[in-house]
Amino acid sequence: METKRDHIFIVDDFADNREMYAYFLSEKGFDVTQVNDGPEALEKAERLKPDLIIMDLSLPGMDGWEAARLLKSGEKTRHIPIVILTAYDVAGAGPVGCEAILTKPCLPDHMIAEISRVLARHKELPGDKSIAVA
């Protein structure tokens, strides 16, 4: 019997970053979809329903905070955990219902550990797993 692999979105406007993250996440057993910007993340998340989204903040057209806010307020996407990945110091910035913040550069093992922690916690929550958005 084949075990379902967790599906992760990598949302980053730099192709090199997306490809690097996708490579090591795939090597660790995740299915990965690469997403270029916020509007694409919204459309694909609603359609493909990933298990977790890694969201850069500096995105063209719509920044990562706005994309996260819209995902967390969407009926079909609010349950999806979001981990912010950014080079900016965002301590105390209030991550719009996001489950974690990782700072670039992020070592692969640290990213995997955080993804695993968030997914495990998310799977343990009973009932509606949505997080309120301010």
Image (tube, rainbow, N blue to C red):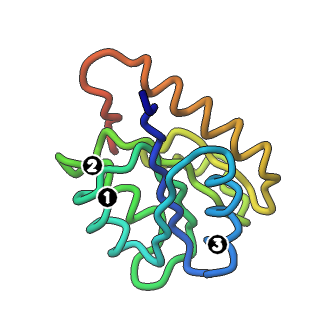
In the rendered view, does 42 fall on the left or right side of 117? Answer: left
Residue at position x 78%, y 55% in the image: 106
Picture layout, residue 129 above or below residue 133:
above
Q: Position of residue 110 (x, y in %)?
A: 77, 43
Residue nearest the observer in this picture, 14 or 99? 14
Residue at position x 68%, y 52% in the image: 27
In the rendered view, does 87 fall on the left or right side of 99? Answer: right
Residue under label 2:
77
Q: Distance between the residues labelled 2 and 1?
A: 7 Å
Picture layout, residue 107 above or below residue 29:
below
Q: What element carries label 3?
A: helix
Residue type at mark 2? Thr
Q: How far apart are marks 1 and 3 (CA)?
A: 19 Å
Picture layout, residue 33 above or below residue 27:
below
Residue at position x 32%, y 28% in the image: 129
Residue under label 3:
19
Q: Quadrant of residue 22?
A: bottom right
In the rendered view, does 112 fall on the left or right side of 128? Answer: right
Q: Where is residue 12 in the image (x, y as percent from the top left)?
A: 56, 72
Label 2 or label 3, whichever comes before in sequence order: 3
Residue nearest the observer in this picture, 73 or 55? 55
User: Viewer-nearest of labels 2 and 1?
Assistant: 1
Residue type at mark 1? Ala
Label 2 or label 1, whichever comes before in sequence order: 1
Residue under label 1:
45
Position of the N terminus, as image quadrant, is top left
